[in-house]
Image (spheres, grey):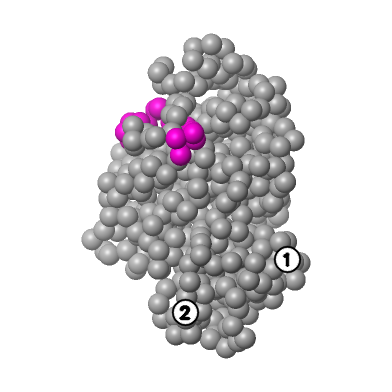
Amino acid sequence: MTTSLSTRNLDSVKSVYFVAICGTGMTALAGMLKARGFEVSGSDQNVYPPMSTFLKENSIPVHHGFDAAHLDPPPDLVVVGNAMSRGNAEVEAVLDRKLFYVSLPFALREFFIRGKYSCVVTGTHGKTTTSSLLAWLLESAGRDPSFFIGGIPENFGKGFKLGDGKHFVLEGDEYDTAFFDKASKFLHYLPDLAIINNIEFDHADIFKNLDEIRTAFARMVNLIPRNGFLLSCWDDPLVREVSAGAFAQVVSFGLDAEADWRAENIQPGPDATEFDVLHKSAVFGHFSTALYGKHMVRNCLAVIAASHILGLTSDEIRVGLGTFKNVQRRLQFKGEVAGVKIFDDFAHHPTEVLATTEGLRDRFPEARLWAIFEPRTATSKRKIFEDKFVAALAAADRVILTPLYAQEKVPEAERLSLDQVCAGLKQKDVPNWVLPANDEMLAFLKANVAQGDVLLFMSNGDFNQIPDKLISQELTVEECK
């Protein structure tokens, strides 16, 4: 007989098995449970570095492939990954045998979040950077926070930490929880303080429209207690709308003149972005960050406001902000070769593509900027964003698109047309090409980039390691045109 974790004695759980252990969040949770002394094991179809390396280093055994036999003898608890569904051999065995199973967010809440001061960072864009930044400011100020983030903050070198401090910082994803729990992950995280950066249509594979996404955020807002805080980006009308339903204290931030926390005098430079912060029209301080773009300034404002609420001084905030490095794959500088600067970013939504491209444009206003984009996610492969992708990519001087990744997963009538995007870019006098992410793209770039160019790779994939190959093969000035 299955029981709810909320009614089960946690002390009785000693062994935990992960179905699909090699997902970023699953691996992190497995490591956290191992650090707490649990017996941890799991399985996955694709087991490769860096996840496989991390699991091996932490003495967590992993089965290759899924097999009901892996659940013998039965573990005390099974954590089922978000990507798993009915038909999976181990999922079927869990259900047939009535083993005790939960989702990742459920386990994270009951084992680690409950009893902590939960700081949940949400929004369609900017969650990873903002949560990483908040975790670092607390760390830098000696608060020893815990955190669970869907990326790798460069200041920490890993996406999770179990600290002795009272704060737990979480990246609050609106994606669904598991095949047996279709609610958004962030509804599990017991927010005491929540940040909403923005709300847009995304995750077209699980949300039908913007109204469904708005509803998910409204439900999260409704979970913040009366003595909690909701930090809302006042530049986003939909964020303002859902914030109206809050029982918690609403604190606004943004570039809007009505925001409680506002940035002025934003000055991007070659090495940093500097700006002034006003709190309720009074000067709070002057700050500097290695991040670029107005979207990053908004992320910083959210963290400055949150840190102030959490008791950090303006000096502690200034030091933390100034020493924050970045998050891997968030406008990450990969290197420079033959005078060509190469950046890598996770952007996949047109709003992110535009913000990231404009951020680099602000940093290198005289450079020729190449935007190299792979439509890979369920959202980016859909026709609904065709015109917005044209507008976003047109912020670059040169554009390379890859063929749609696994295009058969999107109905043809709903599918993004690369021909239409290219035609739109041509109308805006932006040279563009469609090239596969393989040796053909590598050779094209070697033959066409010039000294002083900036290359921006954008995808939730890895572009077949082309950014690294450009650097490792030591492109020479003579090879550039």
391 vs 21: above or below: above
Q: Choose top left, top right, bottom left or bottom right for residue 342.
A: top right
Residue at screen point 49% across, 15% down: 280
Q: Outermost residue, left direction?
A: 413
Instruction: Say which mark, if any, is on residue 1.
Output: 2
In the rendered image, which residue does mark 1 sit on? 37
**Badge nearest the viewer, 2 or 1:** 2
Q: Is residue 170 left or right of residue 230?
A: right
Inspect the image, locate mark 1, and give the three-letter code of the amino acid beneath it: Gly
Q: Does the magenta stretch include residue 235?
A: yes
> How would you rate the neighbour count of disc 2 (Cα within 10 Å): few for under 14, some for 14-19, many for 20 or more?
few
Q: What stretch is highlighted in magenta?
A: 225-241
**Residue 450 in view in this figure:** no
Q: Is residue 37 left or right of residue 301?
A: right
In the rendered image, residue 325, in percent from the top left (x then y), is placed at 68, 38
What kind of element bears circle 2? loop
